[in-house]
Image: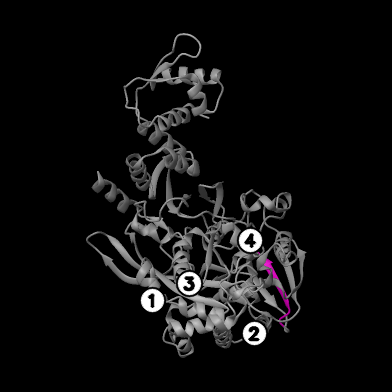
Amino acid sequence: MSIILYFLELRLFFGTQEIGTPFPVTVEKLTGVWHCTPRYAKQIIRKLCELGWIKWQPGRGRGHTSVLTLLTDSDEILLQEAKHRMEQGDVKEAIELMNRFGGNAVKNRYVNWLSAGMGFSTKTVSDKLQDTLRFPVYRTIVTLDPGLIYYCLDSHIAGQVFNTLLTYDHDSRTIMPCIAHSWESGDDGREWMFHLKKGVMFHHGRELTAADVVFSLDRIRLQPDRYESSWMFQDIELVEEMDYKTVRIRLKEPNHLFLRFLSTIPSSIVPRDIVQKDEVGFGKKPVGTGPFRIVRFNEGICSLEAFPTHIQGRPQLDRVEVLMLPGMEPGRLKEPEWTSIMSSYGDTPKAQWKGSSRSDAEWHNMETLFSCCTLLVFNQRKVGPQNHTSFREALHHIIDREQMIADLGGDRFSPAQGFRADMMGSAQTTGANTRLGRREITALLHASGYQGETFRLTTTKYHETDAAWIRERCKSFGIDMEVDIREPSHLAIHHSSPDYDCQLYGNVFVDDEICELEMYLQKNYFLSAFDQQTAEAVTKATESIFRESDELERHRKLTRLEHLIRQTYSILYLVHRKKSTSFHRSVRGVTINSSGWLNFHKIWFHPRMVREECDISH
């Protein structure tokens, strides 16, 4: 432990003692404060005296009381130490230090300092200008292994580190080349040949080959118990390397979503040599071919640097630093407004351009609509009241969404009857909007056979407020609900929480059929909510969607599937979220991906605009 920590421990223990006023203390007392031996305590005392932080007058004789004088307050020392740790990338340690030893005054000073460092900055590094984007998120990144991705933030960062065979343009709804420069299929739609670009380099310096593609796809599809997204590859019969730059894939049956699956994050191509060496640790030390490479990743920070030889060109942005602050209240940092799109603590928004600007402040307005729909997902694999449709229907009516929005406010903006925020007026949701009174709800609970047993809801800290509100509503109807707050990593694994009756989480819906199918077919989403009859219906419906060539008809089938889920109350849709944000005129190349995040690869900063801002601030 550093000498600074010993002083902070001392000052915390003797917090009521005034600076400059002597007071009696024994060495034995200090050994209890510092949890050390008397000999080591004397060494600490000597060092603190040399630094001029304390004055020590030893007592005469063994066991006699000595006199200690605190010569300086701890706030400035704490502030400098927290700043130093943050600058070294030890974000978690810096925040914990401030939370443990800091009072409100020094915490506010630290937050102001931290806020000033958010956003865009340019500094000279090795005689070159380095553009850095730093922003906070109020949660942790669980993993960057593309095969294990569960959360939207993790997916976005992984998308900067890895590339896929193909990519999908959401605006034009077109499959585009990426690692593969061309491809063709046989007449029956079962045989596919992919031709890889030459010179695609992994971050560790090796060229990507067909063997890496075969390995990447096989490790997901052949390990369904480890990789939840293996459902995407269930139709693959064979993946083989034809030569150094050619891959052949044979399907069991034609699948009209197959190319879309190859453009998703789980289909990212990983280096065979690195993953085989340490597959478990790969999520913390990922190596890909993407526009950015990971240079630091721990519990407090994820730092990315531009990859100079990326196949689509070097990013204009040199460095991205994601500060993970799960213990800090969202909005506490005064980060630049345009970065707030990336600082949500739950799920991320999908942005929609409004086309207006405030010329007086030189900020461009952007209204963001959370494609996040919060959900209650029941666990039908466990025996409990949730097994009965009447109990689930009763919960549906107990949870008054409009009252929830009125009571909790924030970014909750409309009741949800499905994934999409524009479904409120649709004919299919009209019945779901019918409200029942207390008598009818009580009758449903009675019909379900509910006898007051504890109903266990599990969620993460990001949804704790919503869970507490739901618990109180249930309590008013005689339902004993217990809320269990768990780490995000626990909910990402489908078999990690077998004891819960219901989960509360948010789904970021990106208006994409793959995202929607994922909710029905991936084990750590909806599968636990289906009884046998519903599960069979879902399997039949999704199989039909795979075989359907017409996109509009696939959309109709997905809509009917969602209607089935509402009818059985297998899932309860709660509320949609929205948020408004802005970005500064100096930020150029702003594009928002389908999950509502800035594409780091495309943004750049106008130097003249940045200089003008600096001149104004000084």
- Name the secondary structure under disc 4: helix
- Classified by dominant secondary structure, the portion drawn in magenta counts as strand
Q: Could you tell me if the residues under marks 1 and 3 are in contact, i.e. CB atoms within 8 Å? A: no
- Foreground: disc 2 or disc 1: 1
The label shown at residue 541 is 2
Tell me which label, 3 or 2, sits earlier in the chain. 3
**Quadrant housing the C terminus:** top left
Q: Amino acid at mark 3?
A: Cys
- Foreground: disc 3 or disc 2: 3
Q: Amino acid at mark 2?
A: Ala
Q: Could you tell me if the residues under marks 1 and 4 are in contact, i.e. CB atoms within 8 Å? A: no
Numbered-mark total:
4
**Would you place residue 360 above or below residue 392 in this image?**
above
Cα distance in 3D space between marks 1 and 3: 16 Å
- Pick the residue in front: 567 or 178: 567
Q: Residue furthest top?
A: 61
